Amino acid sequence: MSWVVDNQLTRFQKFCVNVIKCGPIPRHIAIIMDGNRRYAIRNKMGKTEGHTKGFERLAECLLWCRELGVKEVTVYAFSIENFNRTIEEVDTLMSLAKEKFERVFEEKDKIMMEGIKIRVIGNLSLVPEDIRILLAKSVLLTKDNDKSILNIAFSYTARDEIVHSMKTVVEGLESKKIKPADVDADLISYCMYSNQSPDPDILIRTSGEVRLSDFLLWQISQHTQICFTSVLWPDFSIWHLLGCIFKYQRAFPGLKKYADECQSNRKKLNDRITSFLGDIEKKRMEQMEIYAKT
Ligand code: FPP
Ligand code: MG
């Protein structure tokens, strides 16, 4: 299945999308796509097929988000912890990733026409080289698109991301690009892999597990509506998505008040920090170029 699926919403679904669009629409939704293997067992299929169905659901969910006007989606595609699964399963997930990221180039015209920017957040040094090249090339290919953003957390855990951010801060201090007084929670946020994204408005986890599993822990700590649902990811439908957005809309006045307070408490960046952050972004894109050319 393609990354960009054709719009197949029924009239009734379109009507409901338009009703939901009368209320506040989240700018950024994060998703823990859990339950692929249980779906496979339940439907008497192999694990590979369960994960493939999971990808198909992701492609559809991205379409629903575009229809709803949700600008940014972040998905947990592969956790660093997932490297501890059996060799067969890690290979299956890697093969699926390889196939899907090769498709990015086959579907280049569609992706560019839809203006989809693909970003990858995670520790790419742990990823097999052939996949790392494809991930880096996908990021570089789509870097100037800005209509909708898909952040793929691959070889990611939040604790690894926080450690990465702290190391970046320490490097900045050691090279004297920043001063100890510049270090605060905002600076740590700006040094995360996800520093280009606003904090998620909604976090969805499917499959009935009520855990955060080391996903975006820093970013969801303040004003994110968390939505746990028992549906297995391959069975996630537009109705589940609309239900989560409806919950967000009901909570919106309180969430917005808190989000506005957080925003107004942010300090204005000084020139030193601005230049340091510019260097980080430049380095990150240079690293992508290096990975892509390996
Ligand atoms: C969790 O279900 C799902 C994963 C670990 C993989 C998620 C990946 C996809 C949906 C495919 C996306 C692919 C790309 C290339 C973006 P689980 O395996 O933990 O299932 P279980 O909870 O039922 O055991
Ligand atoms: Mg699971």
Image (cartoon, helix red, strand yellow):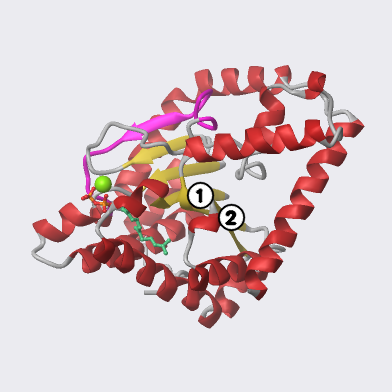
For the stretch drawn in magenta, the main secondary structure is loop
Label 2 near ligand 1 (CB < 8 Å): no
Q: CB atoms at circles 1 and 2 under 8 Å apart?
A: yes
Kind of residue sitting beneath label 2: Ile
- Quadrant location of the C terminus? bottom right
Q: Position of residue 249 (x, y in %)?
A: 45, 30
The residue lying furthest to the bottom in this view is 106
Label 1 near ligand 1 (CB < 8 Å): no
Question: In the depicted view, which residue is nearer to us: 213 or 130?
Answer: 130
At 16% from the left edge and 52% from the top edge, which residue is drawn? 38
> What residue is shown with label 1?
73
Q: Which structural element holds mark 1?
A: strand
- Is the residue 166 above or below the residue 17 in the image? above
Residue 112 left/right relative to 73: right
The residue lying furthest to the right in this view is 271
Q: Which mark is residue 115?
A: none
**Residue 70 falls inside the magenta stretch:** no
> What residue is shown with label 2?
149
Q: Is residue 150 visible?
A: no
**Residue 228 falls inside the magenta stretch:** yes
- Magenta highlight range: 218-233
Q: Position of residue 277 (x, y in %)?
A: 79, 41
At 54% from the left edge and 66% from the top edge, which residue is drawn? 132
Q: Position of residue 126 (x, y in %)?
A: 49, 56
Kind of residue sitting beneath label 1: Val
- Is the residue 122 above or below the residue 132 in the image? above
